[in-house]
Amino acid sequence: RCNKKKLCLKHRCNELCCDRDIHVCEIVCGKPLNCGVHQCEELCHKGFCRKCPVNSYDELTCHCGQTILQPPIACGTQPPACNYKCNRTHTCDHPVYHSCHNESECPPCTHLVSKMCVGEHTLRNSVPCHLKEVLCGQPCGKPLPCGVHTCQRACHSGPCQLVDQKCTQRCTIKRRECGHPCNAICHGYEPCPVKTTCRETIKSRCPCGRLVKDIVCNAKSNESNEGRDDNDLTQSL
């Protein structure tokens, strides 16, 4: 079989007993033309395809119709640029500063307005009109499902917790035996855990008052305070 390349330099002859010196490719090119609508109908060739030969003899206008291109118009020509103001219906009633355009959506409105943040903490001024969610940065403060704590996240939209998420804040109820916070993971309105040791750091002085040291409280709920180290430091501040 002939293994010579055809003039397109893409396909090979592949014929039996071929005695030709020039091999013309007889396959139709079929590549998309520059217009993006039609395909190349020439025989397979090397290099780029020619521009689309199809012309339109209808006027081509911008979206508002005030700027017009006269025919003939080559296939694939984009609507003309227009310097008149956009006359589309907008979502707000602020003045329009952008020109007529061919894009399906208008540019966002940048007119400055006042909007309440999504957490309803404060009214924010000089906010571009197109911003849907305005955040103030303050703690959210909304009650959590546990009924005890409030959301500590910065101002946000949507729920404070996921449906299956539990509160992980620490319990602040004071322990009877030492007055320090319970500090257990949130347990809602359930009683604080029993037989737990207080891990709060406190300062203690020696009997003469000259030495001060940080120690762990070690007070135990519902038990005597046996875990305290009273050998060296006995007087808690």
Image (spheres, rainbow, N blue to C red):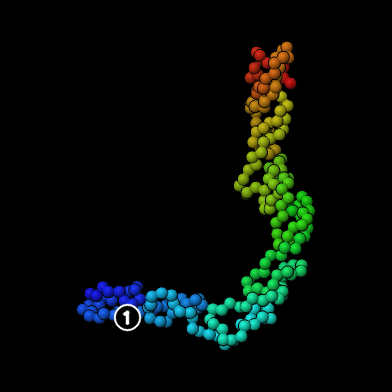
Kindly identify the amino acid type of the residue bearing the numbered disc 1: Val
Residue 231 at x, y = what percent?
65, 13
Instruction: For mark 1, give the secondary structure.
Output: loop
Asked whether the viewer can see residue 53, the reply is yes
228 vs 204, nearest the viewer: 204
Q: Residue at x 23, y 79 (%)?
A: 18
For label 1, the residue is 24
194 vs 47, nearest the viewer: 47
The correct choice, above or below, for 88 with respect to 131 in the image is below
Q: Residue at x 63, y 49 (%)?
A: 163
Residue 156 at x, y = what percent?
69, 51
Q: Quadrant of the C terminus?
A: top right
Q: Residue at x 63, y 43 (%)?
A: 166
Residue, far front: 21
User: To which quarter of the image does residue 181 belong?
Assistant: top right
Q: Quadrant of the N terminus?
A: bottom left
Decide: few, some or many residues near mark 1? Use Cα within 10 Å; few <14, some 14-19, many ≥20: some
- Direction from residue 22 to residue 67 in the image, left or right: right
The correct choice, above or below, for 117 with respect to 225 in the image is below
Q: Residue at x 73, y 69 (%)?
A: 97
- Direction from residue 13 to residue 151 in the image, left or right: right
User: To which quarter of the image does residue 215 belong?
Assistant: top right
Q: How many numbered discs, if any? A: 1
Residue, far bottom: 57
Residue, far left: 17
Residue 17 at x, y = what percent?
21, 78
Residue 207 at x, y = what percent?
72, 12
Asked whether the viewer can see residue 39, the reply is no
